[in-house]
Image (cartoon, rainbow, N blue to C red):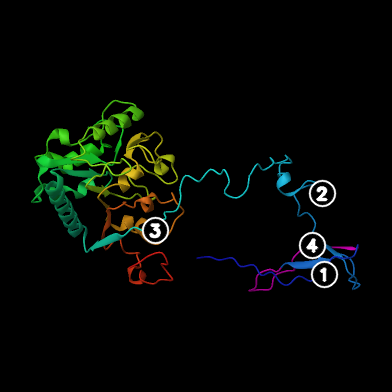
Amino acid sequence: MLQAHMQIPQQSCPARRSIGSRTVRCQASPAPPPTAGKPAARVWTQEGADDGKPFINSIPNNGRWPNGIPPVMGSHLMASGVISPVSVSKGPGIDITEHQFQYHDTETDAVIELYVTPEKAQAGLAVLVQEAAQAAVKAKGAFTLVLSGGSLPSLLTPLASAKGIDWAKTHVFFVDERNVAHTSADSTFKAVQEALTSKVPIPAEQVYAIAENLPVEQAAIQYEGRLISIPPAALPRNAAGFPVFDLILLGVGPDGHVASLFPNRAETSATKGWILPVKASPKPPAERITFSMPVINAAKEVAFVALGPSKAEIVQRVLEVQALPGALPAQLVRPQGGKLRWLLDIASAETLDVARWNEGKRWPRSAF
């Protein structure tokens, strides 16, 4: 790495309390020829002799106003010369509009599962889904599984041979979906169909795909309507009226987005609605539908699946760096009354400092 250094010597003009009327100008003079092996130095010169009397130390050309400092300063006059609006604040905390994102005031327990290889992580994922399916069918006669896109569908193949999953009682949903045809290479439905649902005996009507050929707003309404039509016996609601899915499997993007909830977006901060339209996704395709964050946090269990070296940086940021609310949507995933789990492999967990997670000073808000 190449570094450039600049040495600034002590100024030759003394700093004195300005109580007189004489003005002495201090300015940088041309630097003397540099000494071999040493950087050139800036030398300060003084106009007039120092007679020991108090003076005003004036540095020229350091203002933005060519005609001198205007009589109206500070918050009253902006740099453009336009007088700024008068504040209408009624006082601290009175009639304010809160920021769309707020810090959480509750704690959430997370289980970190670390696997030696991606293959072993896939096997662990299959066991997680199998156990959740068996518990849900035993409790209410149906299992609701929510899947995300990206790299997750390719990890679902071992589920096709998993024992103990009653596919006739399983309902598969998508935490987000691109507003494209089911045959499109961008379709999560297509990816999941190729990796899993075409290989297991699940009824076609129990795989809840996005409606094709609709404007994104109507597609979101149609998908939410399908969810509302599911009997509460199979898809319960919580006290706030949001659906309680048995298991949601999430990926995490390099910017910390989950589903199609991207950093600092209105959809990410939404507190109402089950399914939201996304019209201008920062990641193509531009149009999508997505579960809202309250629906994700209403789930009985949420599991992040992040494998491989490409996930190492964002995994470390989400788990060890407290970002501003909304900057990392993955940090907003906090199931209320449910479980939160991370499935990682050695490569994705490489930059985590797990050995120091129990240090109170380093992690004052965490318990290990």
Mark 3 against mark 4, which lies toward the viewer?
Answer: 3
User: How far apart are labels 3 and 4 at the CA level?
Assistant: 47 Å
User: How far apart are labels 2 and 1 at the CA level?
Assistant: 23 Å
Is the residue 1 above or below the residue 332 in the image? below
On residue 27, the disc is 4
Q: The residue under label 4 is which amino acid type?
A: Gln
Which tag, 2 or 1, sits closer to the chain's start? 1
Would you identify the image quadrant in which residue 56 lies? bottom right
- Report the residue marked by disc 3: 317
Query: Is residue 147 found left or right of 137 in the rendered image?
Result: right
Neighbor class of circle 2 (other Cα within 10 Å; few <14, some 14-19, many 20+) is few
Which tag, 1 or 3, sits closer to the chain's start? 1
Asked if marks 2 and 3 touch (Cβ < 8 Å), the reply is no
Query: Is residue 139 found left or right of 350 in the rendered image?
Result: left
On residue 16, the disc is 1
Neighbor class of circle 1 (other Cα within 10 Å; few <14, some 14-19, many 20+) is few
Magenta region, main secondary structure = loop
Neighbor class of circle 4 (other Cα within 10 Å; few <14, some 14-19, many 20+) is some
